[in-house]
Image (cartoon, rainbow, N blue to C red):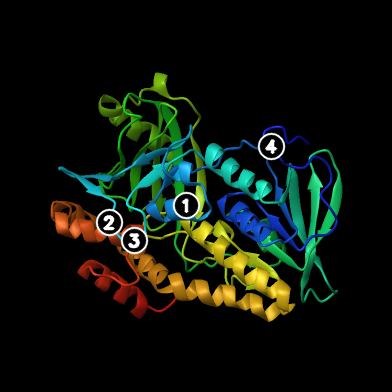
Amino acid sequence: MTSAAAPGAEVGRPPQRADVVVVGAGPGGSATAARLAACGRDVVLLEKDVFPRDKVCGDGLTPRVVKELLDLGLVDEAHGRVAGWATQQGLRIHGGTTVMELPWPELEDWPSWGATATRRVFDQRIAGLAVARGASLHQGITVTGPVWRDHAGSRVAGVTWRTADGQTGEVHAPVVVAADGAGSRVAKAMGIPRRTDRPMAVAVRTYYRSPRSTDDWISSFLDLRDDAGDYLSGYGWVFPLDDGTINVGLGLLDTSKDFRATNYREMLTRWARGLADDWGTTPEAQTDRIRSGPIPMGFNRTPLHQRGVVLVGDAGGMVNPFNGEGISYAMEAAALAAEVIDRALATRRTADLDAYDAELRRRWGGYYTMGKAFAELMGHPAVLHACITYGMPVRPLMEFVLKTMAHLTDARPADTKDVIINTLQRLAPAA
């Protein structure tokens, strides 16, 4: 086991005790660890891979993510002032014969720009911040399950772990944060199933060297079609990066026809070939293999606190069903998790952790319900055809759609669009 790629990470066996053990050093886990360490808590952060490591993602950071970066004090990263980070002014949408550039909205509650950074860069930076604030990061550690306080499994008391070379051990802590992704080992070991009534998607992406890697816009393509020419519920993307490459990918909802039978790697290869004249996406320019992964949406594991285990990020299905974006929700959940956990450790009342689930459902539950309805609606090719043909050319409508799908409104709006969106998500039953 080595930690040479992550300055400050610990080498060797994790300690046996901590206030909190965080499983998974992605954006949600590392942000939770960073905030708890800043509160003076003894935090052990366990990561199964070794930094820098890759994750399947579009690498796009919405204004919601930018706000979390700013709140964490990562100002230069948020403004694209350091290597590996770039900023963009908005979204360029493509659909049918329409191409429209939509700037990120000017709001009181959110920044007016977005950013891009590969997950190799992004995740390592957040993990490094956690270490700088005092968290103990251990890499190459696979968490195999929870340690229980009693034989009845009524309350977690830590986690068990192993390394690739056969070492095993336990870290004991009164609170465990499961931020270990869509296939969460912790959640599975606790018997927390995925909810089949929540949307699911698949993402597939690769990288190309491109003369347009300095583009000021991220691009979204809404008119994906299958071999029969029918519209698919999903979108393609091209996101410019700071290293001279572009992230090119597709995201498809499970409401798409033949969702499970589709060869997504072949689909991406064909689709990228069609972009070559504009983006330089030729086979010779491809710099990485095609990778794919699941996208769990709309709280697909509930409740989000169970027996001393708090679910953060993809482990709890905290992904926007409208656009497949999950980094911002993982990091926002991390901020709340740290606040709730710090208070529960002070009061020594497990029940205080239940506030986490209740508050996240209050914040996002109605919005996720709207997103679930949207995903089901987009599964009908005729609906998609009507939206692209008749809706996309109407700029005020698309500005409303952008705000809705990116979840960008002010809590105290002065804009009619914000009032409508806020009212709808307040009236919708919580997911």
- In space, the residues marked 4 and 2 are separated at their CA atoms by 37 Å
Task: Write down the residue under mark 3.
Answer: 408
Name which residue lies at 35% across and 64% down: 376
- Side of 55 where 341 appears, left or right: right
Task: Write down the residue under mark 4.
Answer: 7
Mark whose residue sits in front, 3 or 1: 1
Mark whose residue sits in front, 2 or 3: 2
- Side of 427 where 145 appears, left or right: right
Query: Mark 4: which amino acid?
Result: Pro
Q: Quadrant of residue 410?
A: bottom left
Q: Secondary structure at mark 1?
A: helix
Q: Which mark is residue 106?
A: 2
- In space, the residues marked 2 and 3 are separated at their CA atoms by 10 Å
* In the depicted structure, whether residue 360 falls above or below residue 406: below
Name which residue lies at 20% across and 70% down: 416
Q: Which mark is residue 187?
A: none
**Who comes first in sequence, dot 4 or dot 2?**
4
Q: Quadrant of residue 44?
A: bottom right
From this viewpoint, is residue 258 visible? Answer: no
**Who comes first in sequence, dot 2 or dot 3?**
2
